[in-house]
Amino acid sequence: MPAAGPSSEPIIPTVPLTAQMRDSLRAIVGAKGLIEDEHGKQPFVTDWRGLLVGRAGAVVRPGSTEEVAQVVRLCHDHGIAIVPQGGNTGLMGGATPWPAHTGIVLSLGRMNRVLELDPTGYTMTVEAGCVLQTLQETASRHDRFLPLSLGAQGSCMIGGNLSTNAGGVQVLRYGNARHLVLGLEVVLPSGEVWDGLRALKKDNTGYDLKHLFMGAEGTLGIITKAVLKLWPAPKDVCTAWLAIRDPRAALEILSEAHSASEDNVGSCELMSRSAIDMVLRHIPGVQDPLRAETPWYLLLEWSSARARRDGAEGMSEKMEQFLADQLEAGRVLDAVIAQTGHQSHNMWRIRESVAEASRAEGPGLSYDVSVAISRIPEFIDLGLKAVLDILPSIRPYPLGHIGDGNLHFSFMAPVGMDQQTLTQYKAAITRAVNDLVTSMDGSISAEHGIGIDKLDELSHYRSKTELDIMRTIKRALDPQNIMNPGKVLRL
Amino acid sequence: MPAAGPSSEPIIPTVPLTAQMRDSLRAIVGAKGLIEDEHGKQPFVTDWRGLLVGRAGAVVRPGSTEEVAQVVRLCHDHGIAIVPQGGNTGLMGGATPWPAHTGIVLSLGRMNRVLELDPTGYTMTVEAGCVLQTLQETASRHDRFLPLSLGAQGSCMIGGNLSTNAGGVQVLRYGNARHLVLGLEVVLPSGEVWDGLRALKKDNTGYDLKHLFMGAEGTLGIITKAVLKLWPAPKDVCTAWLAIRDPRAALEILSEAHSASEDNVGSCELMSRSAIDMVLRHIPGVQDPLRAETPWYLLLEWSSARARRDGAEGMSEKMEQFLADQLEAGRVLDAVIAQTGHQSHNMWRIRESVAEASRAEGPGLSYDVSVAISRIPEFIDLGLKAVLDILPSIRPYPLGHIGDGNLHFSFMAPVGMDQQTLTQYKAAITRAVNDLVTSMDGSISAEHGIGIDKLDELSHYRSKTELDIMRTIKRALDPQNIMNPGKVLRL
């Protein structure tokens, strides 16, 4: 079992693009929709981390579902492999072709129209290539809220978000990307179009196909359009920074926050002191909201869609009352409530700068894992012990979306250790972490998916029965294995 | 295209149970777990409406997942068909065997243990045969709330609820049954057990298999266990009865209620005056909460998990303020807020007694349809016109879960018309309603499913592409077609 990245390349179709095929593709998408030169293809065959570099016969950029369908049908008829791609911001290489890939990258970027926004029905119908942040802003202009929110939102595209069932910082309240979807349009591996673009909250007519395509990372078909659910825009937001007793206290605080906030907990992010200190070391302009005698902190945000009214209790009054109760219960040691937008922005900046700070810090390791929420404290205890047993001087800085049971279980290299030396420990540490996750019925990839990077880990940790069901579905829907081959599953 | 119920029996496996097979089944489940006499089998082969009567070689009642797996493996090895059954309360015949069925009914009723309740993690792990109401009560004893709530809750079982993706009166806020599930254990058509019983909010490791089994009505496997999500118990509930301008006003009221209640709208049920009057005619002890010059009423309930505090604004103060605004906007003509538990119970009793009252009223027709929420008024207008064009003296009493876009589009026979005469109009009316639903991108079965009753309607109204994907999945996972054959899909 390898530490990360597969041990060998999976078998994928390698039918090359002929000159005639290229002509046919050009006839479908136009000269501007076909990229054939190496320089032009380069950003589409490289993952944004720069870790994986693949190849492609051409990059094809269709402008409509009909064009996508024609391109896929052409590929289907000739056995040409297709790598669907949105904003190419994934962390597992799911949108990056393998080096042996001779087929096409199919980029959805030109399909970027918002087709409908229905404020009364709280829905928005969009094309797959819309940039997430554009959609957030569009919803906001209609006094509505699209909850999906994550670091890459300025460049990731909604089709990719749905194909990978993206997570982010609003999952606690609104769910993963798949929970925000009412309907989908999908181009199947045969080139047929499945029109499931229904704006229905209830529809019990046969198998729920949309959930099959979401999270499949483009291996079963290409999502071309979606109907998204919207929520009322937040009007009264209260952000607090809590020094807490320990991770168990975080759980107990969250458990009680649901009712105290009237089910309005937006985010609940656990941070270790070491993660905070790392941010303070590397990110200019960030202030420490609170320093207390504890290694554990919590960013807690409550938000209500109801504007504050004079004389009525708002979110901050409810939060104050709640924090007083939690201080008395000994779970909270100290706390500050953001009084200004600047203060709240500073708190969020700490949380969101961890990735950037960790790159500045130097070599490190990070695992995106989940367990049942109430087992988080146990996982942290056992996980830290297991990793420190292997490399006692490694510096942990755990943090995570505790309300989702999702930890970014992260470590800085020991002071002075270079990447090459750290890599020698990586396989053992990865195995220890993933073995523990699996023994606790957790997930080795909570939100980042499988892609290329975790191909072997999935096949190592999932049961044969589960892998067999997935392979059976994949083979049934894509018998030629042309749709994003060699991702998620090794067939 | 038939009015209801399929035109002909689908082809299903008819391998009979041999004496040796019966011995093997008895060896797995014990003598008490095997019902072979006609009298004993009768309740399991008849649907609870009494409309469908099927046959079975035996009824098998396993007491554990291992027993279910052994029974299914035995059937798989001999090509024997299996009809999985929970509380047998479905409305579409999904749990009733066909008359040609020679295999078994597999009843989950003995698997009725709550395996774990985690109040901090807000989850509950249960066996498929638990009665829904028992689970609601169990959650309630731990100050937690299981939102799934429907008419049959005293006898339906959670496995059936999940297999049919049940709806009910809390969907607006909490979603359908599938949204309440974190993990599943399923016995596959091969007899293998898929252990997906994970209590994870985030898990992006390959295809989401659980959503495939939910809503499949037992045609892809047998759900044996589930991890359910829980919510905080409601502590401050406000129920109101509104006389409203028209269905469009209902939408606008709901649209604004989300923010006014701080996203705490629990239910929003549209009722026509004729539905209310029908209940008042037949259900003793029910009082009319409000009579106004309008045919449209709304039952609106807001509920918060935060207990009322002295001096603080509670749900009823927020509701009062909201109703005043809506009166001023002309959407609400008059309204009452329930001041006592008795008053609120009376309002709910009207809504929940419609089915019973309609049976007392005599012959009728009812369609369980959905459209995009904002198209509900248009659907009501066009649908009433289409049906009245066919039978001008028919008496409509539309009602529905308007927040889900789900109408129970219902009609009493014209005064004095008997069932037989009404049946002569049924095919034309059903076609008119379902054609309209389909032309508006709606669903011909919003919450009740397909089962036997809508087998032909599904194949008439769904695209060939969609039916082909479903058939491909069914054939791949159940190549012998032994798992609830002839339901949902005609292969």
Image (cartoon, coloured by chain):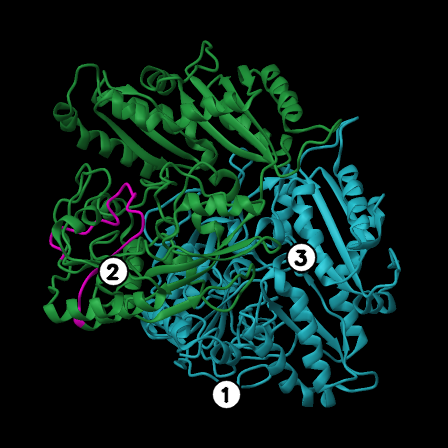
Chain colours: A green, B cyan
| Amino acid tagged 2 | Gly
Residue B465, placed above or below residue A153 = below
The earlier-in-sequence mark between 3 and 1 is: 1
Q: Relative to residue B171, is residue A126 drawn left or right?
A: left
Query: Where does label 3 land, which residue?
Result: B154
| SS label for mark 3 | loop
| Amino acid tagged 1 | Ser
Give percent across and percent down for residue B362.
78, 78
Give percent across and percent down for residue B439.
55, 75
Question: Which residue occupies the foreground of this view, A70 or B456?
Answer: A70
Q: Residues within 10 Å of mark 1 (few under 14, many from 20)?
A: few
Query: Where does label 2 land, which residue?
Result: A33
Magenta region, residue range: A78-101
Give percent across and percent down for residue B302.
71, 45
A88 drawn magenta:
yes
The structure residue drawn at horizontal position 54% and vertical position 38%, both measured from the top left corner, is: B122
Which subunit holds the residue at mark 3?
B
| SS label for mark 2 | helix
Which subunit holds the residue at mark 2?
A
Query: Where does label 1 land, which residue?
Result: B8
Q: Residues within 10 Å of mark 3 (few under 14, many from 20)?
A: few
Q: Do the dots labelled 2 and 1 sit on one chain?
A: no
Q: Nearer the viewer, mark 2 or mark 1?
A: 2
Which subunit holds the residue at mark 1?
B
Kindly give the residue lying farthest to the top in the view shown.
A293
A246 drawn magenta:
no
Q: CA distance from mark 3 to mark 1?
A: 34 Å
